Amino acid sequence: MTTQSPSIAPSGEPWRTTTLASFPPLERWDDWVEYDPSAWPRKVERRYALVPTICFNCEAACGLVAWVDKSTRRIQKLEGNPYHPGSRGRNCAKGPATLNQIHDPQRILYPMKRSGPRGSGAFERTTWDEVVATFGARIRKALVENRRTQVMYHVGRPGHDGAMERVLQAWGVDGHNSHTNVCSGAARLGYALWSGGDRPSPDHANAKFILLLSSHLETGHYFNPHAQRIIEGKMKGAKIATVDVRLSNTASMSDWWLAPYPGTEAALLLGFAHVILAEGLEDTEFLRNWVNWREYMRARGQTPDFAAFRAALVDQYQHYTPEFVAAECGVDAQTVRAIGRAIGAARGAFASHVWRSAASGNLGGWQVARCLQLLNVLTASVGTQGGTALAGTNKYVAKRWNPPPAQDVWSELLYPPEWPLSHHELSFLLPHLIADGRGVIDTYFTRVYNPVWTNPDGFSWIEMLGDESKVGLHACLTPTWSETALWADYVLPMGHATERHDVMSQETHAGRWIGFRQPIGRVLAERDGKTVVATHEVNPGEVWEEDEFWIALSWAIDPDGDLGIRKYFESPYRPGERLSVDDQYRWMFENSVPGLVEEAAKHGLDPLGYMRRFGAFAVPGDTLTPHAHTAPTEGAERNAAEGIWTKDGKTVAIDVAGAPCAGFATPSKRLEFYSPTLVEWGYGDEALPGYIQSHLHRSRLDTARGEIALVPTFRLPTQIHTRSANSKWLAELSNTNPVWIHPTDAAQRGVKSGDLIRVSTRIGHFVARAWVTEGIRPDVVACSHHMGRWRIDIGASTPGAVDAQARSSESLGADRWSSAPVRVEHHAPGQWRVRRTGDVGPFESSDPDSSRVFWSAGGVHQNLAFAVQPDPISGMHCWHQVVTVEIAHGEDRFGDVEVDTTKARAVYLEWLELARARRAAAPPTDLHRPEWFARAVRPSAKAYRKRTS
Amino acid sequence: MQFGFAIDQRKCIGCHACTVACKAENDVPVGSFRTWVQYTEKGQFPAVKRHFTVLRCNHCDAAPCVTICPVNALEKRPDAIVDLDRDLCIGCRACMQACPYDALYFAEDKGVAEKCHFCAHRVEVGLEPACVVVCPVQAIVSGDTSDPTSAIAQLIAAEPTTRRRTEKNTGPRVWYVDPLVEALDPARVQEPEAYLWSDRAAFDVPPPVVPGFEPDEHVVRTLDAPHKPAWGWHVWTYLVTKNVSAGAMMAAPFLALLGVEPGPLRDLGPEIAALGFLAVTGALLTHDLGRPERVWRLLLAPNTQSWLVRGAWVLTAFGGATFGALVARLLGAWAVADLLRWIAVPLAVLTSGYTAWLLAQCRGRDLWLERGIFTGLVLRAGVFGAALALLFAGAAAPFAGVAFLALSLATAWHMNRERTAKASNTLSARAHAMLWSSVARRTPAWIAIGGLVGLGASLAPSLPVLSFAVAVGAVVLSSVGQFIFEREFVRAGQAVPIS
C-alpha cells in the first residue's frame, strides 16, 4: 500500500498527519487511478483527471477539485482543493453537493423565451444569437438615447470580482444593483464608519476570545473557512461566546450562548464595553494612537486631552451596567460581567464578527456592528494576530487592463436621496421606487437573484415584473428555474461552478488569496491539446458563461466601436480582435497579482497555466497591519497638535509614536469612534457607537394583542439561500421550516409541536407548523430561511390564461426536490394568495433518486408576507417582524400565504417617512452621498454631485 | 494495520459535509446513508445545547453482520475493515437486522445491501476516506489504531472515549471523543413527530414511551436519518407457511390417534400439505431476495455460521424426509414411510423453531432477542398440525378437537405470557409496546376462540357438513390470528429506532 504523506501543503498549511494522504499528489492530477467504488470490491480501475475550480454555493469561494472520469468525461465527484489557502482542501456539505446541481435533471440547458403572458409559465426555446441581437439592439438604443439609468444588472450571489464594474462602466450606465441591503448592508455601514473597510476579517485561529453575532460554524461569511479556524482556536484554548435568539449549531459549540431579546444586541455589547472600561481593561496606547479622539473632544467643545477623552468614554457608556443590560436584554448580569472581563483579558486577541443576524434584523442594526467593533478597538484587537483585521487587508482584487472611466450618471432607483448613507443600493425597494415614479427599467438582468422569493414583499415584485411599462425586458441569468425566472422574458442558462470562469477573493482568515473558477470541460479539452473558442462549446447543452455573454453582448451593442464600448472588449494581445476569456485572465494574472509570475515560473508555468493547474494562489504581503505601514509624507505638512500630516487639506498620514503611518480608509485616517460624517449628514445623535431601540423593542409591542417578535432570517448549514432546490442531497437533509416557539409561548397560545399555526404580519399572513423547543428564548419565534419553495401549477390559476399548447410541463418554478406546486391567486387589485395544490414528493426524471423523495412538507414561503422596512439611516431591510401567532383558522391550509399589496405599499410609505424625517434637519448638500463612501461600481466624482440644472 | 475511526465531538459542528461527501463518493441513494449526523438537544432554555453525533458502520471486531450473512458477502478484512461484496450479496437483508448500529441499507435498484467500507477503494490507493478529507474541522480521524504513532491511536490514548452500544459485544471500532453519552443511546432520547428542519419519512414513526422505560427528560433527538424496515410481507407470510408445513408433519404420526380415518388423507395428506407449504415458503424466501437468481449460494457457497444457511439445511432435511415419506408411501414401503414420519417430527420442530435462532442473530432487534420465541413458534406450528388433523378428520373427532384446543390455549397462554413479560431493555420494551398495542393484542383471544370453536365442531357428529364448516371457520380464525401476530411481530421488531 502506498503511504505518501507530504507534510506541508504548498499553501503553507500543515497537511494531515496520518499514513494516508488527503489528496492525490499534484503531479498525478492528469491521470489518477483509483478503484471504481461502484464495482468495489472488484478492483476496476477508474482513471480520473483532476481539475481545480472554486465553489459557487456560498460566497466563501472555497476550493473544489472536479474528478472527471477520463473515459466518460463525466464529473464524478467534487472534493476540496488542498492548494486553496482559504478552504485548505476541506468543504462543507454544499461543496460536494455541487455535483447534484451539475447533473440535476431539471436544469436549464437552452436559452428560453417567454411564449405567453409574463408569469404564465409558457416558454419556448430560442437561440443565443437571437438573445444577443435582441439585447444588444435594445441596450444600444437606450445608450444612444442617453437613458443610462434604465439598464440594470441586479445580482444576487456576486463573486466575479471586478467583472461587472468593467462591463457596466464600459457601457457608461449606472445600473449595478445588488442584494446587499437584504443581507449585510447594515453591518457594512457600521464597520465602514469605523475604518472605511466594510467587512471584518477575524483571525479566529489565533484568538483568545471569539465573539460571534452570527452562526459562523454553520452559515454566514465564510462558513467553511471560518469554522475551520474557530474550532482551531477553540482547541487551542480560545473561549467562544455566541449571540443568537435561537439555539444555533454555533451557539451549541460555544462556551456561552447569549440569547438577548432581539434588537437589544447593541446594548449587550455596550454592556461588555462598560465592564472593560469600568475595570480599566482597555488598551489606552492603542486608543491614543489610532482613534480620532481629538476630533471627538473638539466636537464636544473640549480641548483634545486624552485623559479627558477617557473620562468622556467611560461616561458615555456609564449606564450600560450589567444590571441595565440584564433588564434590557434579558441576559444574566453575571454573565455580562464575566464575558466583558474575558474580552478585556483577551487584549489584542479578540476576534469578533457580525454579518447579518442582529444587524440585518433590526431598525438601527447598523449600530450593532459599530458597537462590536468598539470592543475590538478597546482591546486593541484591530489588525492583530488573533484579532480582527479589515476586509481590505485580507482580500485581493486583481485589476483588469485598460479600465473604462467611471459612469457620469447617478441612478436614484439605486441610491434614492432619502438614504444617502446606505452602504449599498436600496435594491429591495425597487418596486416601490418605480411606483413612486422615480424611474423605469428598460432592460433588466437578474443574475443568480430571486427577488420574488428572497426579498420581502414578493407580491409587489410580481406586480412590477409583470408590468411591461415598468420593466421593459427582463432576462434572468440562472442555471436553474426559480420563482423569479417565471416572470422573466428570457431565461438564460449560465454555468455552474464547473462551467465558467471567475476570479474571487474573500477575507476568510489572516491571509490573502485569489481563487480561480474555471470550466472543467474546457480545461480538459485544452489539456488534450484541443482549441476551445468558447466555453459553451464544451458545456452541457447551450449553457454559457457570463464572461462570454457580456463580451458578446458588448460587441452587439457597439459592433463598429462608434460608441466607444467595443474597445474594452478587445484583446490586449490581439488588437482589434474580440477579447477571449483566456486573454482576460491571462492579463490579470500576468500583470496584477503580486508574486504570481514568480511562483508560476518556479513550477515552469505561465501565470494563467499556474492558476489553471492550482486553482488558487496565496497573495504575499502583510495581512494584518497595513495601517501601521509608513506613509509617504513628501509635500505634506505635519500638524503635531493633531498628530497628522496633511496635503491639500486632506490627511495623508497619522502620527503614531512619531512615525507617519498610513492609517485607515477614513477621512481622519483614524478609527472613527466619533463620526463627523454622521453629524454632517444630519444624524448627529448617532455620532458615537450606540444603542438604537429596534422596531420590535418590547415597548413597541402590543403584547395584549399577542404580538411577538419573529426572527425569519436564520439559515441552515445545508442550504444556500434559494439556490439549493436543485440539490437532492441537501434537500434530503433539510426540507422544512417549522416556526420555533418556546414552550411558554406555545402554552399561552394553545399550540403544540406539529400544530398548524397562522402567523400574521401587517400585510397578511402565512400558515406554518409549530416546533415547540427549548432552543429559543421566550417572547420570540423564529422560522428558517430557504424553505417554502414553490412552482406554479400551470393553468391552475395563474395571471393570464395560457394556451394549453404552450405549456411545456404541468408545473414550473423551483426545482422539484424542494418545491411544492401552488396556485398563485390574484383575487382583486392587491389581493394575492399562494395556495399549495400538492406536496413535495417523488417525481419521474432521468435520475432514479427522484422516485425516492421521502419528504413532503417543503415549508412555507414566509418572506412573501413581510412588508419592506428600510432602516432610516442604513437603508437595510429590517428583517425581523412583529407578528401574531395563533392556531390556524378553519380555512387555512399548510403553506398558505395571503397578502394585500396595498397594505405593503402603505408600510413602505411609513418607513419612507421615517427616513425623510431623519433627513429633515440635515444641512443642505449637493452630494448624493459622502465622497469617501464606497459604492459598488462607483460613479465619477461629478456624478456624486447632484445636477443643478 | 487495524483501521478505525475516531469522531472528535469536541470539534464536530454538525455540518453534514461527511454525509454528502460520502454520498458523492459512493453514489448512495436518496433516503439511505452510509454515514449520517444526528442532532440531540439536551437541557432547558437557556441551559440547552445541541449535540452532534456522527453515525456509521463501526467495523466491529465481532461483526454480527458478517456472522449472519449467509453467503459470505460480508467480510472482516485483515485490516479490520468490514467490507461487503455486492457481487456475492443475495439481498436477504439479514445483515440489516443483525447490525445494532443501523449501518446497512438495501439498495433497491441493485437488489443488494450496501454499507460504509471505510472507502477501501481509496484506502488501497493511499487516500483517506472521503468523509475524513472533507471535514471542515477535521473531527473525523481515520487510521491504524494498532500503530501507537498514528493520529488516531494518539487521540484515543490521550482522550477519554466512548463507543456505541458496547452491551452488544460487537467490538465497535469507532471511538467517540467527548460525545453526549445520552445521544449514543437510543433508549435515552425522546423522539418527536418531525425534526427541526426535516420531515420524518412516512415509515419512520416515533416509538411509544413505555412506563418504566422513559427516555431522559429534556433530551430530544432533533434530526436523524430515516432507516427503512428491511423485512416485509414475505417474511411474516413465510413464518406462517413454514409453520403450516412444519405443523403438518408434527401431526402426521398422530393422525390415527386423533381420529382421522384411514385413507389417502391420512396416508398422504400431511406430506402433500407440508411439501406444498414448504414450496410456498421457499418461493417466498427466494422472491424476497434482492437477487433471487443467486439463491443457490445459500447451499453452495454458504457461511455455516449463519442461521439462514442452517435454516436452509433444516428446511432441506425436513423437505427430504417428508418427500421420502411420501415416495415410500406411494411405493408401498409403509414401514419406511412411517419411520420417515417419525424422523420428520424433530425436523419439523426445527423447521418451525430455527427462526428463533436466526432472530437471535439479529442483534439489532431487541424484541427478537427476547426468550420464548422458539417455544411460541413451535406451539403455533402445533396448532396448525392439530388444525390439519381436525380438518382431515371431518366431524366426530373429539381427540383432534381436544388437541387443537389444547395447543391453541397453550399458544394463547404463551402469547399472553409474552405480552405481560417485562422487557429486558428499553428498545425491546418499545418494540414490545408497539407489538402489543397493535391489532396483535387481539390475536391470542382469536386463537383461543378458534380452539374452542374447533373443539365444538369436533364434538358434533350429526351435522358433518355444518360441523366441518365450523371447523374450517375455527381454523381460519386461528390462522388469521397467527398471520396477524407474525406480521406485527416482524414489523414491531424493526420499527424502533436503534441508533
Image (cartoon, rainbow, N blue to C red):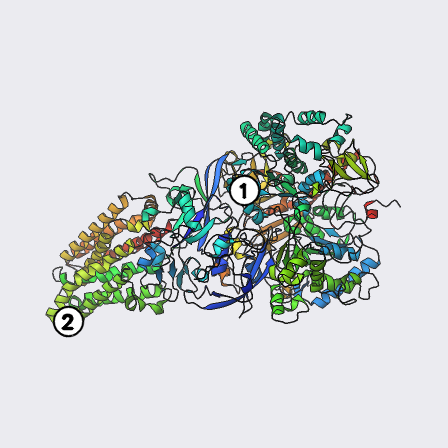
Q: CA distance from mark 1 to mark 2?
A: 84 Å
Residue in front for this viewpoint, A318 or A326: A318
Q: Which residue is mark 2?
A: B329
Give how far across and how far down residue A333 sits, in percent: 55, 27
Q: In the rendered structure, find residue A534 and report the number of the disc placed on it.
A: none
Q: Is residue B495 visible?
A: yes
Residue in front for this viewpoint, A271 or B124: B124
Q: Is residue A330 visible?
A: no
Above or below, A490 against B494 in this view is below
Give how far across and how far down residue A622 sits, in percent: 66, 46
Give how far across and how far down residue A801 sits, in percent: 66, 59
Above or below, A281 against B138 in this view is above
In the rendered structure, the answer to whether residue A78 lies left or right of residue A627 reads: left
Instruction: Determine which quarter of the picture holds residue A885.
Output: top right
* Mark 1 element type: helix
Q: In the rendered structure, find residue A233 and report the number of the disc placed on it.
A: 1
**Residue type, label 1:** Gly
Crowding near the residue tagged with mark 2, few <14, some 14–19, many ≥20 C-alpha atoms within 10 Å: some
> Do the CB atoms of the residues marked 1 and 2 lie less than 8 Å apart?
no
Give the quadrant of the N terminus of chain B.
Answer: bottom left
Pinpoint the chain carrying mark 2: B
